[in-house]
Amino acid sequence: MRSRAIWFLFAFGALLPGCFAQSAPAGTPEANPSRPTVSTPATLTPVGYLQFENGFLFAKDSLEFSERLALNQVTRLAVHPRIELILQSEPVVHSDLSTQHELHEGEVFAGAQTVLIQGHESRPTVSVSYIRRLHASVAPEIDIGTFRQSVLILVSGEVLGFHFDANGIATEQAEESVRRAQFGQTLSVSHPLKGFTISGEIWHFSQPLHQGNAVGNLWAVSYPLRKNLVVDGGFNRGLTSTSTRWELFAGFTYLLPRRLWKARK
C-alpha cells in the first residue's frame, strides 16, 4: 500500500507546478475554497474566474473497504453573482479489501448553486444547489455512500469573529432497483490564526441502504500562499460503528488569475 500511496502523492504533486508557475496579476480576486470540509460555503466564487479544487483522500476501515486512496477534483465557475456551475469527480480510486486490490475511475457529478439571499454584515448568505451524477463507478464508497441526485440548502455567515458554513442535504441513493432517501446535516466553524485558518466540523448522514448513521468530526488547517492559491490538510474521525474510522486529506484551491470574459461596465 505504501508504494501506491507514494504514486498518488506523486500524481497529486504533478498538479501543483502549473499553479505556482503563473503569478497572479494585480486585481485578481481571492479564491473561495469549498474544501477541505464536508460543508460547502453558501457564497460563490468570483464571477468569470475558473476555480480548481484538487486533493487526495486516504480512508481506512469502512463498510466497503479496509483502505481507500483517491484523487478528487472540483471545478467551479460563477457565471452570474447568484449562479455558479459545478463539476466534480474522482479521476482515480484505489481500494483494498482483505487481499483484494482494485483500481477504478471514480464517479462524475455536475450541478449548479444559486444564491437566494446575499449576506451582508450580520446577515448570512443563503443558497441552494442541485447536483446530479453523470457517471457511475464500481469503486467502493466511503461511509456516506454515493447518490444519483442531491439537493442542498447552504448557509454561511460570521458570528463573534468566527465563520460558519451549515448545510442541510437530501439525496437519492440507489442500489440496483432500490431507491432510498438520505438526509445529512453539517456544521463547520473556522477562525484565522496567524495567517492560517483552523476549521472544526461535525457532520451526520443517514445510511438508508445499511440501516445506520454515519457521524464524523473533522479538523483542518489551510494557508493562502497567494490570495488565489490556498493549500490545506487535515483529518476526519468517524464516531459510529458504520462510519469510516479514519480519513486523511490534503490539497489546494487555485483560482485561475485571468477572467474568461470581460466584465460589463
Image: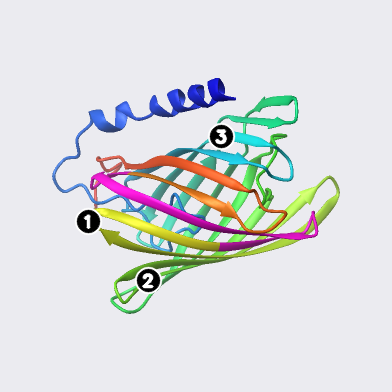
The residue beneath circle 2 is 157
Do we see residue 216 in this rendering?
yes
Closer mark to the observer between disc 2 and disc 1:
1
At label 3, the amino acid type is Ala
Label 2–label 1 contact, CB within 8 A: no
Residue 85 spot, x, y in % from top left: 46, 50
At label 2, the amino acid type is Gly
Quadrant of res 260? top left
Of helix, strand and loop, which one carries label 3? Answer: strand
The residue beneath circle 1 is 194
User: Disc 2 or 3, which lies upstream in sequence?
Assistant: 3
At label 1, the amino acid type is Lys
Of helix, strand and loop, which one carries label 2? Answer: strand
- The image's mark for residue 70 is 3
Residue 199 spot, x, y in % from top left: 40, 58
Residue 110 spot, x, y in % from top left: 55, 46
Residue 157 left/right relative to 27: right
- Asked if residue 11 is positioned above or below residue 126 in the image, the reply reads above
Residue 243 left/right relative to 256: right
